Amino acid sequence: MALKVARRGTVAPFLAMDMLARANRRQQAGGAVVHLEVGQPGTPAPRKVLDAAARFLAGGQIGYTEALGIGRLREAIAGHYRRFYGAEVPSERIAVTTGSSSGFLLAFLAAFEPGDRVALATPYYPAYRNFLIALGLEPVLLPATAATGFHPTPALLDAERDLEGLIVASPANPTGSMLSPDELRQLVAYCADRGIRFVSDEIYHGITFGKPAMTLADLDPHAIVVNSFSKYFSMTGWRIGWLVLPEDLVRPVERLAQNLYISPPALSQEAGVVALDCRAELDDYVAAYAEKRRFLLRELPGCGLSDFAPCDGAFYLYIDVGHLTNDSTDLCHRLLDEAGVALTPGLDFDPDRGQRYLRLSFAGPMADMEAAVGRLRTFFARG
């Protein structure tokens, strides 16, 4: 007799991770792979972070902390908002989380009820939609276009009804595009007028090219801001992030965190305090991203890839390959199998139009970008 399997586990797979697994199998069989499929910095955590973690480990006592995080880290994050944005954010409204993923889970559980409709523009980070579905919420997909940087607009929102939430990322994954301050303020005002909870994914803040990102932390008192040490701070495996919460959600998030997670990892919290004081080293990493971005924007057109979403930040290129195929999944499989280049099909980010797009991550070393361009040029030259 077959036992029941909950429908929550039937969410769509995360294709970037499927591509990583496929690429790893190729490597294990002896094939070479250039990894451009996952958004993981190829740089280590800052030196001072590693040194601080070693000292903390040597102390021998790593236990539970408060569910919302240690006071020193929450205060340090508040200081980060003052220095980085000129924003005043009380440390009492900051919740430290086990990466941004648990932050989204806690935020969605605290802010929405099953059946609530939450909007997000396509293309989008796939975990948004899958989190919402697994929690019994209804994702409302807004068909954004390149003309708006694939971001939502009041006009797109007007076409929907009974929205309880809106998720926005700027810079965005997979496109790297950013909203201007005026565009962001327009969306905030729209949501405020209609009682829509704004969820701002700011995980790629700090990795921008030519213009800084704007935070909602002090712009909208009802917004939820999600951030992480994974991208700009180059600490993916440390699994540490944070929320900036409106006052009415602090205690609900704390109660949920106490029961679901107990507390964020103590070692990573101690490391996070130090990471917030490593701007010089981290900005060198961003300069390296900018150099790889320039290289790819210059060289990829020679491979037949020239139609990109605006890449204002993060470390992705979202590339229209509709002139080559209407099956970017098949194209990604062929590129891996025949050229040893791992990319992510756009279907991961847009179930309707994604088959004509692919995402390239330039988070890895420059040598990988150079190798990938050579392999792509050879692959596409064969027709």
Image: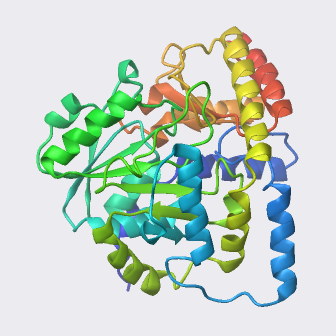
Looking at the image, which residue is at 49% across and 47% down?
A: 202
Residue 244 pos. (x, y %): 43, 61
Looking at the image, which residue is at 44% across and 72% down?
A: 92
Query: Eyeballing the image, is 132 above or below 309?
Result: below
Identify the image quadrant of the N terminus. bottom left
Total marks shown come to: 0
Q: Name the one closer to the observer, 264 or 330.
A: 264
Q: How is the image coloured?
A: rainbow
Q: Quadrant of residue 265?
A: bottom right
The answer to whether any part of residue 9 appears in the image is no
Residue 117 pos. (x, y %): 21, 54
Residue 162 pos. (x, y %): 12, 50
The answer to whether any part of residue 88 appears in the image is yes
Looking at the image, which residue is at 15% across and 40% down?
A: 160
Query: Eyeballing the image, is 379 above or below 46?
Result: above
Looking at the image, which residue is at 86% across and 31% down?
A: 367
Residue 49 pos. (x, y %): 79, 62
Query: Eyeballing the image, is 2 above or below 333?
Result: below
Q: Name the one closer to the observer, 309 or 74.
A: 74
Identify the image quadrant of the C terminus. top right
Left-right relation of 170 to 69 = left
Left-right relation of 332 to 104 = right
Left-right relation of 315 to 42 = left
Q: Name the one closer to the observer, 5 or 275.
A: 275
